Amino acid sequence: MSGLVDASGVSRNPGSDHRNEESETKQRPAHERFLLFFLVPSWSLSFLIHLLLILALALWFLSPPTESPISFQVGTSDSQLPEDINVDFSGMELEESTLEVEESTKLDDAPKLEELLPMQLEVPSDLPATPDMLQETPMGALAAASSPSGFGETGGRTGESRQKMLRENGGTAESEECVELALEWLAKHQLKDGSWNFDHTVGPGSRSRKNPGSYTQHSAAATAMALLPFLGSGFTHKEGKYKEVVLNGLRYLVEVRGINTPNGFSFFRSNNADDMYSHGLASIAICEAYAMTGDSWLQSAAQGTIKFIEYSQHSEGGWRYVPKQRGDTSVVGWQIMALKSGKMAGLEVSDEVVTQASRFLDLVSIDTGSHFGYMDKPAEVNGNHKTCTAIGLLCRMYLGWNREHPGLTNGVNFLAKQGPYLGSLDYPIGANMYYNYYATQVMLQYGGKPWQDWNPRMRDFLVKNMDREGNERGSWFFPGGDLGAQTGGRLYFTAMAAMTLEVYYRYMPLYKEKSVEDDFKLR
């Protein structure tokens, strides 16, 4: 063991030092021994110094710490999470079926979640949510105040206002019963992931097996088309007995089918699946749901769909199947209706895009705008272009034409002479619901005798020809009426017929006193 080192640097043995000092003390005289008693020996000095150091260190460690002005605490807290999260992932599995679905992308090429939804969505606290959705909505220029259900142009869809508009515009208890039965049928044929398919035979449970559509890849179009009757009847993801049905359908559109691109929130697919028809329909559904609830969860997606429509417009002002393609009146109709839905929801809509759309309508119309063709002006005035004329006239109403405009007056008189298309010799009930849907809106908004003559024919035909038995109860199918008989099938006809019977209260009137036409119109 090594000895201690004193101040001189000499190593000493502690035991021998102690004995030497004791011997020296005994050999000294008494008076020196007394004096030395008062003197401090070297080992005592060392002891005293070490004692003082120990006391100083003790005082330093035991003194209270000074408070820092900024304190950070990192961690997680269960109290910050929603209390009632109960996620059942098994419910998101699709039922096995024989339907062959063409894959749109390889797994490696599939867009990541952050690419699909970079603008984070806020999920209502009272709804079941998955962990991916528990994010805050960024505040920005698109922020809008929440509005109560059924405000503005959709204010006639519920309550006393609905009953009043139903009576004034010519609806009946029988027509309302048909709407309710149609909603039951549509809800019954929703798939587990929240979507619908034009082949409505696919899926679990007891369902109709008759008249499926062939457009099996157009799930955005089918889902949007099925959602619109629920919204038209005042049901949202926040209110009414179908709120879970509507919620699941909207979630499918926003979280599964839509893709956030640099040019907006898109439902377009280039692989023979959803096209600009689908995008227009999905945009209408999302914008209407946002308009009716003011729910910030839908805000960025709704605004994004409008942005994509604006991006996709052709230089002549129209739209067709793919973005930037020269337009046709049919696809243009859905895009203008989507822009109108966005406008009534308080979203940003480009004035230049609206102006260009009006120019397209000029390019495909004749006789002061009273007759419309498909991609060009009609060669002559006959019934072959009545569908395009109905679409064009409704668009003109949304774009601001007044009731006295000669093009609108002449066009309405033309449609009145044609009447609803309710069948032919080959197909006695082969109703063309595409034409009927648009023309019924035109006639209602115009009002007067043309509407009074039109309404009972259209209304009573639909009431009479709804299927009332078996799994088809609450649905319609019209063979040979229009292309929807093959492509959209029974789901398509049911949605179009239901919306036609909701026309009495779906939108506020354009040409009546105290209407909200200034807000309702695009400009």
Image: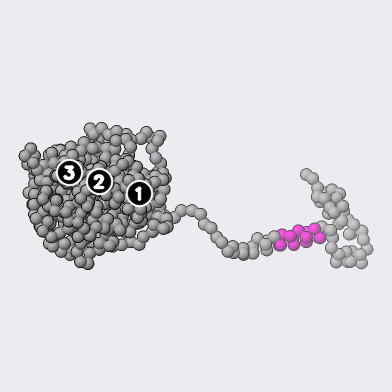
Measuring 12% from the left and 56% from the top, which residue is drawn there? 450
Query: Residue 380 bears which disc, if any?
Result: 3
Q: Is residue 129 magenta?
A: no
Q: Nearer the viewer, mark 2 or mark 1?
A: 2
Q: Quadrant of the N terminus?
A: top right
Q: Quadrant of the C terminus?
A: bottom left
Q: Single out the residue that lies furthest toward the right.
A: 29
Query: Residue 310 bears which disc, if any?
Result: 1
**Mark with earlier residue (2, 1):** 1
Cα gap from disc 2 to disc 3, whole angstroms: 12 Å
Measuring 84% from the left and 52% from the top, which residue is drawn there? 6
Q: Whole-percent x and y of residue 65?
A: 62, 63
Cα gap from disc 2 to disc 1, whole angstroms: 20 Å
Between residue 61 and residue 398, name the one nearer to us: 398
* SS class, disc 1: helix
Measuring 31% from the left and 41% from the top, which residue is drawn there? 326
Measuring 84% from the left and 48% from the top, which residue is drawn there? 11
Residue count near mark 1 (Cα–Cα under 10 Å), binned few <14, some 14–19, many ≥20: many
Residue type pointed to by label 2: Val
Between residue 192 and residue 141, name the one nearer to us: 141
Between residue 432 and residue 314, name the one nearer to us: 314
| Residue picked out by circle 2 | 364
Circle 2/circle 3 CB separation < 8 Å: no
- What's drawn in magenta, residue-wise? 45-56
Cα gap from disc 3 to disc 1, whole angstroms: 32 Å
Q: Whole-percent x and y of residue 204?
A: 21, 40
